[in-house]
C-alpha cells in the first residue's frame, strides 16, 4: 500500500437528495430542542450532566476502556470513581477536561482554530501519560491494528507531513464556512483521524474536534449535539470503524469521494437527535412523577435533583449529594435515610462505599416513562448492509 506524500485533505462530497433531506430533519429536530429550552426547565441541568457523562463514556468505550456511566458522572462532579480502576479513571478525567474546554470556550466569539489549540486539547486528554507525548505530534510512523484479527488496517501519513497537514486542516476549519456545520464537523473528524497526528488518543481527539466545530456554529446547545454517545454503542462502533475503513482503504491517500463517511455521520446525528428528543420527553415525564412523589411524602425541594439522577439509573453517594445540594453532611445523611425509609431509594454497602439506587415508586416511574417511548427510525436503512461488506484495501 502506497501512501500519498501530497499535502491534501479529504474534501466535502456532493450531498445526495437523501443526504439533504436527512440534514434538514436534523436541523428541524435541533430547532425543536432549542425552542424547548428557551423556557427554563428544572430538569435541564440534570439531563445535561447525564448527556455529557454518556458522551465521555461513549468516546472512551470506543478505545476499549470499560467505562461505567457513573464513573463518567463522577469525573464531571470532581468526585471519586464508583468502580473504575485508577488508569481508566485517569482516561475518563482526561477526556472530561478536553470536553469541558470545548464546551466552555467553543462558542466564544473571539475563539479561533489554531494548531496550538489542538495540541493543548491533546495534552488535556493525555497529560497523565507522559510516555505518550501529550500535546506533541508523533515523531515516527503509525499503524492501526485490528486486535481481533491481528491485522494492520491502516497506515497514517509520514510523520514529516503531519505539521503541514494539520496546518491545512486548521486553515480549512477557519475558512470553510460555505458548508453546513454538521458537514464541516464530519469532515474535520475524518481528516484528523486519518492524519493520526499523535502517538495515541487520535480517535478521541477527532471526536472532540468534531464537537468543537459544532460549538462554533448555531446548531444549538453543543452538549445535546455531539454523536459520541451514539458512536460508543457497540454495534455503532463496529459500523464506525467500517465507515472509516471503506473511506480510507487502509492507507493515507485522500480521495475525492468521502460520501459514505458523510452519510454515516448524518445518520449518527439524525439518530442521536431522535434520542435526545425522546430524552426531553422522558425528562418532562420523570419530573412530573417526581413532583408528585415529593408532594406525597412532604419532601424538601432539594432532593429533586438527587431523585432525578436515581430515576435515570445512577448510583447516588452522600458526597455527591452534598456537593450538588450545597448542604452539610448531617443534613445529607438525614435526607438519604428518609428517602430509604419512605421506599424511594435502596441503600447498598457501608461506610465510604455506601451508595443508593432507585426503589419503589421511582422504579415504577422509570418503567412507566420507558413504556411510552417512541421508536427510533433509521434514516439510511441501506447503510448497515453496505458497511458490512469487505473493505477493499488500496494497492
Image: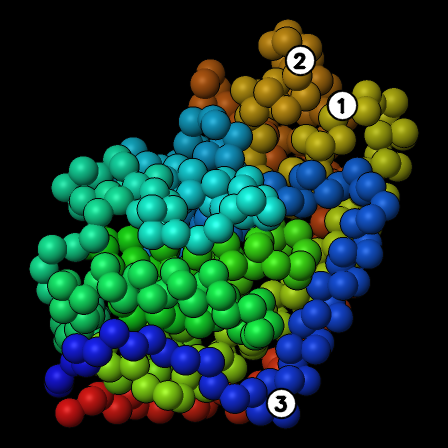
Quarter placement of the N terminus: bottom left
Which structural element holds mark 1? helix
Q: Answer few, some or many: residues within 10 Å of disc 1's Cα (few below 14, many 20 plus, some between 14 and 19).
A: some
Label 3 – label 2 distance at C-alpha: 53 Å
Q: Answer few, some or many: residues within 10 Å of disc 2's Cα (few below 14, many 20 plus, some between 14 and 19).
A: few
The residue that appears at 85% across and 46% down in the rendered structure is 39
The residue that appears at 66% across and 61% down in the rendered structure is 219
Question: Quick check: marks 3 and 2 in contact, CB under 8 Å?
Answer: no
Q: Indicate whether 381 appears above or below 292.
A: below
Instruction: Give me the disc on residue 94.
Output: none
- Going by the image, does 25 lie left or right of 185? right
Quarter placement of the C terminus: bottom left
Question: Which of these two is toward me, 51 or 220?
Answer: 220
The residue that appears at 67% across and 59% down in the rendered structure is 218
| Residue marked by disc 3 | 18
Question: Quick check: marks 1 and 3 in contact, CB under 8 Å?
Answer: no
Which structural element holds mark 2? loop
Which structural element holds mark 3? helix
Instruction: Give me the disc on residue 302.
Output: 1
Q: Indicate whether 284 appears above or below 305.
A: below
- Going by the image, does 270 lie left or right of 201? right
| Residue marked by disc 2 | 327
Amino acid at each position: 500500500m502506497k501512501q500519498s506524500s501530497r499535502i491534501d485533505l479529504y474534501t466535502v462530497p456532493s450531498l445526495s437528495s437523501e443526504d439533504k433531506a436527512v440534514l434538514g430533519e436534523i436541523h428541524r429536530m435541533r430547532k425543536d430542542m432549542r425552542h424547548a429550552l428557551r423556557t427554563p426547565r428544572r430538569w435541564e441541568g440534570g439531563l445535561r450532566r447525564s448527556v455529557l457523562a454518556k458522551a465521555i463514556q461513549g468516546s472512551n468505550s470506543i478505545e476499549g476502556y470499560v467505562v461505567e456511566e457513573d464513573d463518567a458522572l463522577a469525573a464531571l462532579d470532581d468526585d471519586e470513581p464508583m468502580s473504575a480502576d485508577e488508569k481508566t479513571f485517569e482516561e475518563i478525567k482526561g477526556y472530561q477536561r478536553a470536553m469541558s474546554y470545548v464546551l466552555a470556550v467553543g462558542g466564544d466569539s473571539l475563539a479561533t482554530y489554531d494548531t496550538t489549540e489542538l495540541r493543548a486539547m491533546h495534552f488535556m486528554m493525555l497529560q497523565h501519560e507522559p510516555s505518550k507525548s501529550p500535546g506533541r505530534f508523533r515523531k515516527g510512523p503509525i499503524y492501526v491494528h485490528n486486535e481481533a484479527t491481528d491485522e494492520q488496517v491502516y497506515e497514517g501519513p509520514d510523520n514529516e507531513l503531519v505539521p503541514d497537514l494539520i496546518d491545512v486542516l486548521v486553515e480549512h476549519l477557519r475558512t470553510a464556512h460555505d458548508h453546513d456545520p454538521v458537514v464541516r464537523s464530519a469532515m474535520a473528524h475524518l481528516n484528523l483521524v486519518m492524519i493520526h497526528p499523535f502517538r495515541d488518543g487520535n480517535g478521541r481527539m477527532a471526536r472532540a474536534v468534531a464537537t468543537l466545530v459544532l460549538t462554533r456554529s448555531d446548531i444549538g446547545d453543543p452538549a445535546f449535539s455531539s454523536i459520541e454517545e451514539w458512536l460508543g454503542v457497540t454495534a455503532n462502533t463496529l459500523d464506525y470503524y467500517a465507515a472509516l475503513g471503506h473511506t480510507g482503504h487502509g492507507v493515507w491517500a485522500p480521495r475525492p469521494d468521502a460520501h459514505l463517511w458523510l452519510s454515516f455521520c448524518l445518520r449518527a446525528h439524525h439518530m442521536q437527535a431522535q434520542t435526545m428528543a425522546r430524552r426531553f420527553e422522558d425528562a418532562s415525564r420523570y419530573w412530573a412523577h417526581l413532583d408528585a412523589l415529593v408532594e406525597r411524602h412532604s419532601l424538601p425541594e432539594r432532593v429533586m435533583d438527587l431523585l432525578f439522577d436515581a430515576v435515570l439509573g445512577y448510583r447516588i453517594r452522600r458526597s455527591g449529594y452534598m456537593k450538588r445540594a450545597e448542604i452539610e453532611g448531617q443534613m445529607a445523611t438525614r435526607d438519604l435515610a428518609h428517602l430509604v425509609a419512605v421506599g424511594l431509594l435502596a441503600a447498598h454497602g457501608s461506610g465510604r462505599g455506601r451508595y443508593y439506587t432507585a426503589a419503589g415508586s421511582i422504579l415504577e416511574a422509570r418503567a412507566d416513562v420507558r413504556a411510552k417511548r417512541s421508536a427510533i427510525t433509521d434514516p439510511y436503512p441501506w447503510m448497515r448492509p453496505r458497511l458490512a461488506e469487505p473493505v477493499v484495501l488500496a494497492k
